[in-house]
Amino acid sequence: MLMHEACRVSGLTKKAVDYYVAQGLVQPELLGNGYRGFSEGDVERLKRISTLRRLGLPVQEIRTALDGGQMLAAAARRRALAAEAEEARAKVLRRLAETGDWSDADAQLEALEQKQTIQERLLTAFPGYYGQYVSLHFGRYLNGPVTSEAQRKAFAEVVAFLDRVSLHLPPELQEYLDETAKGLDGALVEAVQADVDNAVQDIEAYLTAHQEELEQYLRLKESGEFQQSQAGRLAAELRRFQAAAGYRDILIPAMKRLSPAYRAYHDALEQANRVFLERYPGAANGPEADG
């Protein structure tokens, strides 16, 4: 169909369609008479672009969100981060109005900006729902004020690390990860993290209460069937990536220097892992695996 028909069916103006064509979001066929021909697929894509624009996504995000699935989920998470940051700024403003403490407001805003920067980069560096998980996971420890030059240096190290790394999984493992992680949201991550926190606080009691399940799980992990499964292959890929990228040697230490709350959490996790390995010395990876 020609431009006027494509506009009528998609509900867009000619100016909007011309813009999306110029941005490479849709590529109609150039006909012999010099006109552009839009296929049904082109028009459906224009409709989706219109929907995403109405949702407030900029062109660059639309470019990836059109792929659907994990890209749409990442775009949704970015919008959620922006909304959370806006609410946090409103709280800082209300507090400033009440206290008149400008230095406190500056410190709170610096922490907020750092948190948003790190979470956005985590979404970019790690694909799909895994990126959403690590963004939510680390984000819960980035609410404290920035009070020292050491913290600012650690922040720069975290950003530099995330800017240079990117996790690329084989397509079948990426598909498996996205399928198993559907429904992941902040509430679920908080619930999982609360369970981890409870275990860390009294690891001996946790190991005793869950002895049968843990031993079954460890037997499963050691089996050839698990190692050849998508879950086993995914776990191996993540371990290889973390070792090669310096996840534990660079990112985790910098996060601990940046956030006292994260340092306390991770130190407790490492202690719990030592207890775990004392009881199960054959285990290849303990509870520290998620960082």
Image (cartoon, rainbow, N blue to C red):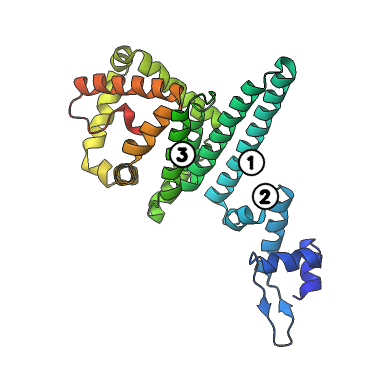
- Label 1 to label 3, Cα distance in Å? 24 Å
Q: Position of residue 59 (x, y in %)?
A: 66, 56
Q: Residue furthest bottom?
A: 32
Q: Earlier in the sequence, mark 2 or mark 3?
A: 2
The answer, for residue 267, to whether it is visible in the render is yes
Task: Say if mark 2 contacts mark 3, CB within 8 Å.
Answer: no
- Label 2 to label 3, Cα distance in Å? 28 Å
Residue shown at 41% from the left, 43% from the top: 161
Q: Position of residue 285 (x, y in %)?
A: 26, 32
Task: Say if mark 1 contacts mark 2, CB within 8 Å.
Answer: yes
Q: Amino acid at mark 1?
A: Arg
Q: Position of residue 174 (x, y in %)?
A: 42, 50
Q: Which dot marks residue 173?
A: none
**Secondary structure at numbered mark 3:** helix
**Secondary structure at numbered mark 2:** loop
Residue shown at 39% from the left, 33% from the top: 254
For disc 3, the marked residue is 156
- Label 1 to label 2, Cα distance in Å? 8 Å
For disc 2, the marked residue is 57
In which quadrant is the C terminus drawn?
top left
**Secondary structure at numbered mark 1:** helix
For disc 1, the marked residue is 79
Horizontal relation, residue 135 to residue 291: left or right: right
The answer, for residue 291, to whether it is visible in the render is no
Residue shown at 66% from the left, 35% from the top: 83
Horizontal relation, residue 31 to residue 225: left or right: right
Q: Position of residue 57 (x, y in %)?
A: 67, 50
Q: Amino acid at mark 2?
A: Leu
In which quadrant is the N terminus drawn?
bottom right
Q: Earlier in the sequence, mark 1 or mark 2?
A: 2
